[in-house]
Image: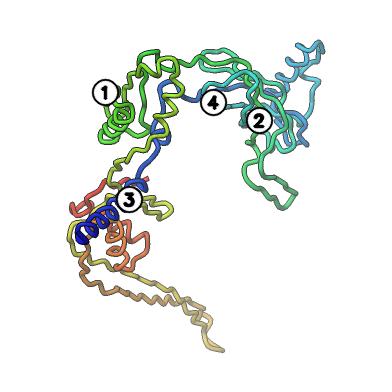
Amino acid sequence: MKKIILLMALLSLVTYHLSLATAVHAERIKDIANFEGVRDNQLIGYGIIVGLNGTGDKGKTAIQSISSMLERMGVTVNPNDIKTKSIAAVVITATLPPFAKPGIKTDALVSTIGDANSIQGGTLLLTPLKGPDGKVYGLAQGPVSIGGFAAEGEGASSQKNHPTAGKVPEGVTIEREPLFILGDANEIRLFLHKADFATADKISREINQAFNGEYAFAVDPSSVRLAVPPVYKDNIVRMITKVEEMNVQVDMTAKVVINERTGTIIIGDNVRISPVAIAHGSLAIEIKEMPEVSQPLPFAPDKAETTVVPRTNVSVKEQKAALIPVSGVTLGQVVRALNTLGVTPRDLISILQALKASGALRAELEII
């Protein structure tokens, strides 16, 4: 009896640890996918920034825009009479969040399109922002923040960040609600952020298990079709909330990402290295030029002259490299095996590329 109780306790402990391991690698569906219709939209507009301290545009584009604006306000001004560097023509961009309602505020990004040196301290005038369909969805206005500065004198200058681009925090007011179609009353689709057959299948099985029926199935590696259960016909929002809170174990592709510019290397959890021997050494060649000057002796003949005699020292150093066995079936083993080589990240990039060429690296190698 004691053996049975001990065995049951051991099985419970193993099950508990397995459940913890599964939970660690699980992701919420809302973090790896989104429902059809839930998406951002981009807005754009052309505007004018005023109040600059002599750092504005020197051309006529901004001046003509100011003249047209003043004319619409009932003030007629000849553009040739406007001589100022306190204004700048800018392009305003903003992101319209999903299901945005009139009155909601969001940030505006402004960027100069002329020859302005800085928009620090400027104020964006009221600017309509349009969507791809040409309709106005928001209005932008407010003080510009560039998160830096720019100062210069006759002999020196100092700059932090980009003074010709900035942000108007909560400077966009939504004026029109965009049209969003969240499926229909009978069916809705779920789109994965990263296409994967295994992940799409796991999502459909998790949804079917939670709803106790065959309501979801994977259409392709990037989408899952979900039939609305009868109990949620009149409350799709509650169904979506329940689906988004489900945890799914994501199947990741074995991949090694290399950034050759910065020497950064990212190794995924599923990366494996077949047993292989690696020898890596470096060759250092040093060349020193030490010219010597030869001067004539005192009272030398008139034909004597000073000459420069070249002296070159060349030294070659080559480090000895021994074959080191490398293999690994887990991420920890791969990292420890590569660390035994004692090489720099730059050398490690060359080693990984050679491992991929030899077929020993069982992973996708991506160079960015």
Foreground mark, 1 or 4, reads 1
Amino acid marked by disc 4: Pro
Alpha-carbon span between mark 2 and mark 3: 42 Å
Give x and y (percent) for residue 116. Answer: 68, 34
Q: Secondary structure at mark 3?
A: helix
Image spot of residue 34 (x, y percent)? 41, 28
Which comes before the other along the chain, label 1 or label 3? Answer: 3
Assess disc 3: are there few (<14), some (14-19) or many (≥20) residues with their C-alpha within 10 Å of its C-alpha: few
User: Which residue carries the number 2 mark?
Assistant: 170
Q: Residue at x 36, y 14 (%)?
A: 186
Q: Nearer the viewer, mark 2 or mark 3?
A: 3
Report the number of numbered marks: 4
Q: Residues within 10 Å of mark 1 (few under 14, many from 20)?
A: some
Q: Which residue is mark 4?
A: 97
Nearer to us: label 1 or label 2: 1
Residues marked 4 and 2 touching at CB (< 8 Å): no
Badge 1 vs badge 4, beta-carbon distance below 8 Å: no
Q: Which residue is mark 1?
A: 214
At a point 34% along the width and 66% down the height, the residue shown is 343
Q: In terms of secondary structure, where does tag 4 sit? A: loop
Check disc 2 and give the amino acid type: Glu
Please name the amino acid that badge 3 sits on.
Ala
Identify the residue at image location x=50%, y=25%.
Answer: 40
Query: Which residue is drawn at the image coordinates 47% and 76% (left, top)?
Result: 308
